[in-house]
Amino acid sequence: VQSVFLLCCSPFSSLPLRYGYFGENGEFLYYDNLRSARATDSYIFSGAPDEAGQLWQPAFTYHGFRHIEIFHWPCSDDDTEDGDSNAFGLPTYMLRCKNFPRVQMIHFRTDMEQHGDIRSSNPVVNSFWEMALGSLSSNVMSVPTDCPQRDERLGWMGDAGSSADISALAFDVAAFHNAFLDLIEDDMSSNGSIPDVVPFYRYGNQPADPSWSSAFVFILYSRYHVAGDIRSYAKHRDGVKLYLENMYRQYQRRGGFEGMEKSGIAWGTYGEWVPADVKQRPSATYISAFNW
């Protein structure tokens, strides 16, 4: 999210702020990955004579971004002054504008203490670790989310399960993961099926892709083998039993893996969601069998 300090402008002037990532092919910023998300705030000035300026910080949303694009900054000739220094690489009109906004990025997430770290003599390894921490930190917003920027930001189970171990190694996730396990059971149907997204909202299916729903077991196992926690499993043991019974019924209805192979109907929707080589992507059924 961001905090933007704005000096006063004329009443009811509107200032759009759009959030994105580094542009490609000559574009200033890249927005295609946002899909239907507008990722835009519009600040409307009151025009009140406030020499201290005005502060804008979203209260009911947050944005994942690397850059902010500020459109049509209302800077008149009376608001400008000569500027000689270009230390920040800013365009000349920005240097001359006395009331150009000051922007501060504020990184926030669910409060979890970091208790794991990696430091090596190899700067590339260190950079990978810092990027991993950044990715994890940007996707712990009450639930483990899939992304911080586009039109989802939801608790996709595939992301939650695949990141369970590294999250537990890097952060104290006891309260965070235990709360999410409770949400999984809340969304579990009476027959033991679990949705792809928890809380179940907007996207996904129920029953979930087997690889996605397996996050229920993966997170519980992570709590045990990383933190030595068996109380979480004891709490959710009945739910796990109900879930595994549901999975076995799904397997039987499809005639087992031989039946799936004959019918050509995959058991699962997503499979290997982002393969390194699309041409060598294994079938969704193969991935479901592996995770099951």
Image (tube, grey):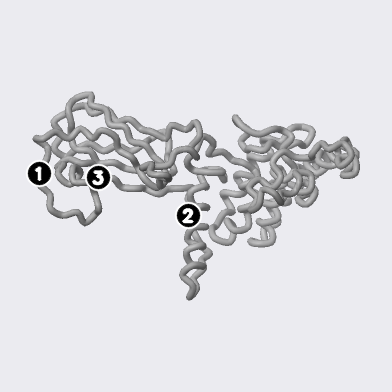
Q: Disc 3 marks which residue?
A: 102
Whichever of callouts 1 and 3 sits on the residue coming sooner in the sequence is 1
* Residue lying farthest to the bottom in this orientation: 121
What amino acid is at disc 2?
Answer: Gly
Q: Position of residue 186 (x, y in %)?
A: 67, 36
Circles 2 and 3, Cβ within 8 Å, touching? The answer is: no
- Label 2 crowd bin: few (<14), some (14–19), many (20+), radius 10 Å: few
Whichever of callouts 2 and 3 sits on the residue coming sooner in the sequence is 3
Name the image quarter holding residue 187. top right
Q: Nearer the viewer, residue 127 or 251?
A: 127
* CA–CA distance in space, label 1 to label 3: 17 Å
Q: Nearer the viewer, residue 243 or 100?
A: 100
Q: Nearer the viewer, mark 1 or mark 2?
A: 1
- Label 3 crowd bin: few (<14), some (14–19), many (20+), radius 10 Å: few
Q: Disc 1 marks which residue?
A: 81
Name the residue located 65 percent from the left edge and 34 percent from the top edge.
204
Name the residue located 90 percent from the left edge and 44 percent from the top edge.
258
* Residue lying farthest to the front in this orientation: 25
Name the residue located 82 percent from the left edge and 36 percent from the top edge.
265
Q: Disc 2 marks which residue?
A: 134
User: Residue 121, relative to residue 19: is it above or below?
Assistant: below
Name the residue located 24 percent from the left edge and 45 percent from the top edge.
102
